Image: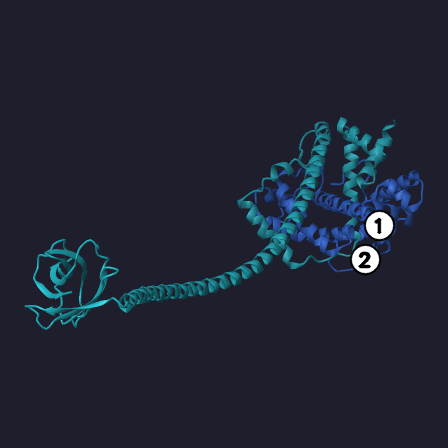
Amino acid sequence: METEAPDNPLHLIQRMATGDRDAFARFYDRYAALVLTFATRLLQVRADAEDLLQEVFLQVWRQAKSYDQARGSPEAWIMTITRSRAIDKLRSRRRRDESAGSPQVSSPLDGVAKVENGAAESEARLTVHGALAHLPEAQRVVLELAYFDGFTQAEIAARLGEPLGTVKTRLRAGLERLRGFLGVKSSGGLL
Amino acid sequence: MNHDEWLERAEIYAVGALDGDELVQFEAHLAAGCPVCEKRLQETRETLTLLPHSLPLMTPPPGVKARLLEQIAVESTWPPPLQPRLRRHWWGVGLSALAAAGLLIGLSIDLYRTRQELHRLTSMVSTLQTDLARREETIQSLGANLDSTQRQLQRAEGEVATLQAELAKREETIQAERQELRQVQGAMAMLQSELAEREQALRLLSAPQVRLVRLTGLEPSPGAGGRLLWNPTMYTGVLLTSGLPPTPSDRIYELWAIAGNEPIPAGIFAVDEGGHALLRLPPLPKTKRVNKFAVTLEPAGGVAKPTGPMLLLGSL
């Protein structure tokens, strides 16, 4: 799985761990657009997302030494960093809004599934998009509310006016379906 | 509880949607060490992290990369003190799944505390910043006040200086005026005493019993002369001289009233350039029978008995 190709992300992380700034530049080139896209969807504000983009890559640089490939792929690593930082901001923003008495910003769920059919799109991205696009609406909505908007199962149930059990079922069903589209079995390793 | 239920929770946990008691219980379950749940968690994360690929891809602004490279170049020279602590993130724990699970809870708590601490520090910093901003505002407004106060003070100081200069000038004037006043007073006193003397002389001379005694010049100044107005009732008089030579600085003229052969000192006097003098005699003892008057040249200050040459002489 681990190749010696210069732009292999595992290899780049190893080089970053030794303070190789060129490896950092390459790693950035590979993931910056994806991180910004994800961050913008999470935070809904472009400027906040650009700030987050910087924070995420600084964290990547600082923690390259402690990255352990046994615990996840480089992409899972950087997406987890992005999401957890964004959710922190999102939740504190919501707490502020609530204490200020302003209504919660509802997420623009309808705009999410749009596809940009650029030439540079990877096979994986097209596949995932296909998977998301083919999810039943109910499953897609709960997954996006949880993963992109940072709501917990109880919050989703309250927003949708559905029983908690239904939300759980839809979440797991959606995940199962995604795994199926991606060709990942629940018992097998992704990598 | 059936272990499948833990696996279900693992998936919802991976999506970030687990909450309440279920969250607490699941984290405890993980912390106790469950490789199966760990694996499911990891797989679900891998599945989920491909979701962002379904979004329209955005292009980062060109400046971000340059800024990051700049910043990491700086950090390569001075590693930030926060680094060792951040390195303890769960991702970096390369131990067995069991040990890792145990560590996870500890590190999660650690991370939670770090975040709490960070949150606390952030709000503290924000409070301090607000405070600072307020203080700076206060200082600025105080500064502005100070400026205007200083300007007022400068103006006032200027006025004070002007007033002081004026005062000094007035004091000078007053000083000069006082000086003048003193001179005037002195002159007046002199005039008054002169007037009093003349009045006295006039009174003395206007009395009907007053007699005139002519004093004639002897050798060495035969051209000199004098007239003495003698009031025999008051036993005093006034001497007027003319033609007497000027006295050397250590000499003075002395008038003598002579009773028989006994000369009685009757006053000393100097003369002006014309040899003129006016001398008011002191009251003389009435027991003496004065019949002559003479003027001699004596040492300055006068003497009790004549010692020098006689220049004028006259008889009653």
Using the image, name the chain to which the residue with label 2 belongs. A
Indicate the secondary structure of the residue bearing disc 2. Answer: loop
| Any part of residue A186 in sight | no
Q: CA distance from mark 1 to mark 2?
A: 27 Å
Residue B184 x, y percent position in the rendering: 35, 67
Q: Quadrant of the N terminus of chain A?
A: top right
Q: Which mark is residue B213?
A: none
In this picture, residue A52 sits left or right of residue A6: right
Residue B165 x, y percent position in the rendering: 44, 64
Asked whether A132 or B31 is in front, the reply is B31
Indicate the secondary structure of the residue bearing disc 1. Answer: loop
Q: Mark 2: which amino acid? A: Val
- Chain (blue): A
Number of numbered discs visible in the structure rendering: 2
Name of the residue lying farthest toward the left: B219
- Chain (cyan): B
Q: Which mark is residue A115?
A: 2
Using the image, name the chain to which the residue with label 1 belongs. A
Which quadrant holds residue B41?
top right
Q: Mark 1: which amino acid? A: Gln
Q: Quadrant of the C terminus of chain A?
A: top right
Q: Residue at x 25, y 61 (%)?
A: B233
Residue A66 x, y percent position in the rendering: 64, 38
Q: Which residue is mark 1?
A: A104
Q: Earlier in the sequence, mark 1 or mark 2?
A: 1
In this picture, residue A60 sits left or right of residue B219: right
Task: Tell me: residue B276, above or below residue A94.
Answer: below
User: Neighbour class for label 1 at 10 Å: few (<14), some, many (≥20)?
Assistant: few
Q: Residue at x 63, y 36 (%)?
A: B85
Residue A64 x, y percent position in the rendering: 63, 42
User: Neighbour class for label 2 at 10 Å: few (<14), some, many (≥20)?
Assistant: some
